Image: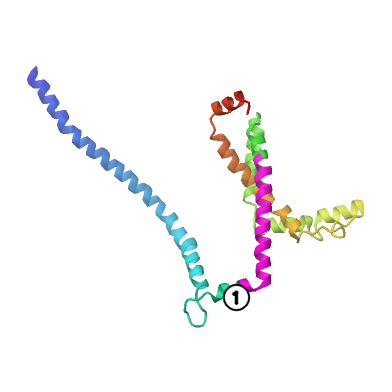
Amino acid sequence: MQPEVQAATARNATQAPSKARRETGRSWSYTLTSWLGLVPFLLFCLLFEILPAIIIIQGSFTDNNTGASTLDNYKHMFSQVSNLHAFQTSISISLVTALLGGLIGGFAAYGVYTLRTGSLRNLLVGFSSIAANFAGVPLAFAYVATLGITGYITVLIHTLFHVNIYDLGFSLYTFTGLVIVYPSFHLPLRILLTLAALSAFSPSWRESASNLGA
């Protein structure tokens, strides 16, 4: 019996390294396959995002006539009052709309998260997913068609109440008008991001916080 046990032990000792090598080979093969799947995405980012950004940045420091490196392009840009005003307006709109979208969207996300009706919650999440991608030219056209000078809401208010909101000082093409437009996709995007964070919380954390008076 003793020789059989020794033989079995020897076979196991011989098979263990070969099994470990096979497992290591499978692991490397899986890792290589996973990275190969990222190649098209990485090429897309390189060709359409990274390289254009590098070319634009390099061109901003290059003289168009001589091709030499220069800072004159930035000096000329910041010496124009209209450019500085455009930067100031863009930054102001970004800050105001981001704060509005963050605050209102955060409370809205918490309200959706605490809903007990699953169908209504799924409906709101689905609508937010669509609205978060409704930006750019389609969003601008939608607001021009609704709240523009000849938009149907503007015309409807004028027809029903004989009031022209543009005569009262409202304009879609001012700072206030843009602040109204931008949260249209900031809010649903904030809801989706906050819902993902809230869903990652453990229920026990919320229970513990409630017991401690939160």
Tell me residue 206's x, y (percent).
Answer: 58, 28
163 or 95: nearer the viewer: 95
| Residue of label 1 | 76
- 193 on left or right of 104: left
- From the viewer's perspective, tell me whether residue 41 is left or right of residue 190: left
Quadrant occupied by the N terminus = top left
Secondary structure beneath label 1: helix
In the image, residue 13 sits, relative to residue 46, either above or below, namely above
Could you say which quadrant of the image residue 46 lies in?
bottom left
Judge whether 174 appears above or below 115 on screen: below
Q: What's the residue at 49%, 66% (across, down)? A: 52
Locate residue 195: give its quadrant: top right
Which segment is the magenta one? 78-106
User: Is residue 170 in view?
Assistant: yes
* Residue 138 visible in the displayed image: no
196 left or right, relative to 167: left
Residue 57 location (% of width, % of height): 50, 68
**Which residue corresponds to the image point at 91% horizontal and 51% vertical from the top-left?**
161
